[in-house]
Amino acid sequence: MRRTNSESIGSLIRQYLRQQGLESPLNEYRLMQGWSHVMGPVVARYTRDLTIRNQTLYVKLSSPAVRQELLMQRHDLVARLNAYVGAQVICDIVFS
């Protein structure tokens, strides 16, 4: 006997995570882990700390020149990071 209403394992896991309220924290974790992949090794080297609060990514940088360059690309970076995760995780980035 075969079931006709089968679902994929991936969709069941996503549904479970959403029900348990774990989807957002997992996406935030994936975004922070993907920072160095999206930004590249040069920017990752100058990054000291990443935190997310209220859909805003706070990034501490050790180089004022890198901070200024990233400020000009802020909106593009938000789109690239959200695309990496595959969900709308952040709306803004604050560099300090």
Image (cartoon, rainbow, N blue to C red):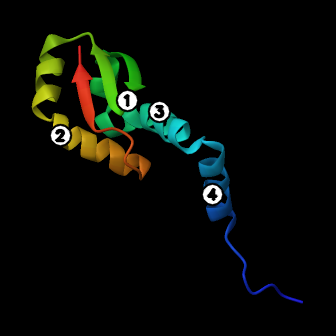
Residue plotted at (49% across, 38% down): 30
Mark 2 or mark 1: whose residue is earlier in sequence: 1
Could you tell me how far apart the alpha carbons at marks 2 and 1 are, in whole angstroms? 17 Å
Name the residue located 34 percent from the left edge and 51 percent from the top edge.
83
Q: Cα distance, mark 4 to mark 1?
A: 23 Å
Return the residue nearer the eye: 63 or 90. Answer: 90
Look at the picture and state if 35 lies above or below 44: below
Q: Mark number for residue 15?
A: 4
What is the crowding at mark 1: few (fewer than 14 residues within 10 Å), some, or many (at least 20)?
Answer: few
Amino acid carrying label 2: it is His
Q: Which dot, 2 or 3, sits closer to the camera?
A: 2
Q: Position of residue 10 (x, y in %)?
A: 64, 61
Picture residue at 23% right of the left edge, 20% below the top: 95
In the image, which is nearer the foreground, mark 3 or mark 1?
A: 1
Mark 2 burial class by Cα count in 10 Å: few <14, some 14-19, many 20+: few
What separation in Å lies between label 3 and label 1 (alpha carbons)?
18 Å
The amino acid sitting under disc 4 is Gln
Q: CA distance from mark 2 to mark 3?
A: 19 Å
Q: Which residue is mark 2?
A: 75
Q: CA distance from mark 2 to mark 4?
A: 30 Å
Q: Position of residue 8 (x, y in %)?
A: 67, 70
Identify the secondary structure beneath mark 1.
Answer: loop
Q: Which residue is mark 1?
A: 54
Q: Which numbered mark, 2 or 4, is in the foreground of this view?
A: 4
Q: Earlier in the sequence, mark 3 or mark 4?
A: 4
